[in-house]
Amino acid sequence: MVNQQAESRIITDGLSYRYPEAERDAVSNVALHVRAGEFVCILGHNGSGKSTLAKLFNALYVPTEGTVWVCGMDTKDDDLVFDIRQHAGMVFQNPDNQIVATVVEEDVAFGLENNGVPPQEIRVRVDEALAAVGIKDKAKKAPHMLSGGQKQRVAIAGVMAMRPSVIILDESTAMLDPSGRQEVLSTVRRLNQEEGISIVLITHYMVEAAQADMIYVMDDGKIAMSGTPRQVFSKIDEVRALGLDVPPMTAMAQTLRSAGLAVRADVLTVDEMVEEVCRLQQKG
Amino acid sequence: MPIAAEGVNYVYMAGSPYETKALDDVNLTIEDGEFVALIGHTGSGKSTLVQHLNGLLAPTSGRVLVDGQDLADKGTDRRAVRFHVGLVFQYPENQLFEETVEKDIAFGPKNLGLPQEEIGRRVREAMQKVALSYEELAQRSVFELSGGQMRRVAIAGVLAMEPKVLVLDEPCAGLDPRGREEILGLIRRLHEESGTTIVMVSHSMDDVANLAERVIVMEHGRIAMDGTPREIFSKGEALRAMGLDVPQAVELAEALRARGIPVPEGAYLPDEVAQAVLSAVGGGQQNAG
């Protein structure tokens, strides 16, 4: 267990959470892990328990039953809450609700100032964080003059300045337009690949989920499906029964297969579909 | 109830350093019974344009005619026009405020001064149109509902005014796949069964491809393209240059053509492209054999 905790960023075991006065668990007996450097996506229709789970990951909620370890720290331990939140940073849905300062770099510095980090160190970390999300040129701007995608990157920079091990994004692309979504997603992927930061992405966009290493599908507070995007999305009927959808190319693969064409069932992207069609044409 | 925009210009914050021309010489006519999708990059003028369609914003110059009446004319009953052209804003559930679902939906008709009986009929009918059970939900607080249900209550409030034209600004934003499906199904039914004219602002090219009969593309406050989905989506390069996507089926068709697999020009629906793949590859296999 000790070894596993060292290489896993988040581990949950028998995790349940019930809101005060609720009749049933919002999260029920969930066991999962997020490894170092892993990109995990959590899917599920509204009310399936995704956001509750996310809030259990950084000690905003404390388990009713079971345990959450963040980088080996039990979230039930009050003394560790600040350490846990520094290691597992969270970005929320509405870009307008999470910016507190009137200048971008001051907003990014906010968490550091609260943690009593020395000023010289703050300067270094803020510059680093702004560069990491690609908005160094916006450091002196007023946040309200930025686009939605840029605002979310400011929020991510605020988390990055804390030098986290995991970033949890709770529908952080839901209110953005397609280019804003693309902006946030490519930022997150770069932080994952280049800085080795683990990512937990909660989303309703299947095309975003297709880029993850691992998907967990929530339903009624439980994990209903889990696996790689290929494993999960190739079970189209099961995914749809859970109120979700599959990427458009996975749906097209099913159409082609039911018409008798032997394309793979686990196609996720346009490029893969093109390769499949060309492969079959050459074979013919 | 056709709507026409003639040479419409609109300037935000005129005379300030932030002066922006949000609409630049916009000319268009929307006929009865059309299903128009309005697409464009954020800041292209889509939302400004839809707010002109029912007189919520007045053009800086140019005019907007609803059923031939100029909205700026003193003689025009703007209030009456607003009842005929229903506008559903982004995140309309943020504007729910009444104690119960029924009261919220009845708010508009009540302000019209309609008799109680008529109000009751309209509330029931509107709830039926958005597939919310009157018996189950009418007396509930709107804040006990799910996000998708709240949005349908907000839309029902607009439908209770019995508009001839329904304008929706990103009606699916922020919903989960099931919620999106419900809202899109409802819009499709309103168009097909009640003949309501639909103007829908959307960022989802797949939704636009599946629903719209006409697509208007905005860029820098101007109408950059106006045509059928088939015409618009065959110009993938021009759309991408404006920062827009094409449906994935179109992307696939383009990529297959580039690899020498024949897909008819203009194919944009998933089933069309799948059919082309089957006849190209399936047929190839038979000939080769």
Image (cartoon, rainbow, N blue to C red):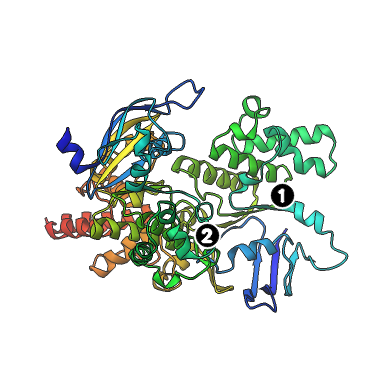
Q: Is residue A224 left or right of residue B123?
A: left
Q: How many callouts does the rendering have?
A: 2
Image mark for residue A101 = 2
Instruction: State the residue in front, A174 or B54.
Output: A174
Q: Quadrant of residue B67?
A: bottom right
Of all chains, the one bearing label 2 is: A
Going by the numbered disc 1, the residue's amino acid type is Pro
Callout 1: 10 Å neighbours few (<14), some, many (20+)? Answer: some
Of all chains, the one bearing label 1 is: B
Callouts 2 and 1 on one subunit: no
In x, y percent, where is residue B248? 36, 58
Callout 2: 10 Å neighbours few (<14), some, many (20+)? Answer: some
In x, y percent, where is residue A124? 34, 66
Q: CA distance from mark 2 to mark 1?
A: 43 Å
Relative to A73, residue A247 above or below:
below
Question: Mark 1 highlights which residue?
Answer: B163
Instruction: State the residue in front, A58 or B42.
Output: A58
Farthest-out residue, top = A23
Instruction: State the residue in front, B11 or A18.
Output: A18
Quadrant location of the C terminus of chain B in the rendered image: bottom left
Image mark for residue B214 = none
Going by the numbered disc 2, the residue's amino acid type is Ala
Relative to A212, residue B3 above or below:
below
Quadrant location of the N terminus of chain B in the rendered image: bottom right
Query: Could you tell me if residue B268 is visible in this image?
Result: no
Instruction: State the residue in front, A77 or A29.
Output: A77
Q: Is residue B223 left or right of residue A160?
A: right
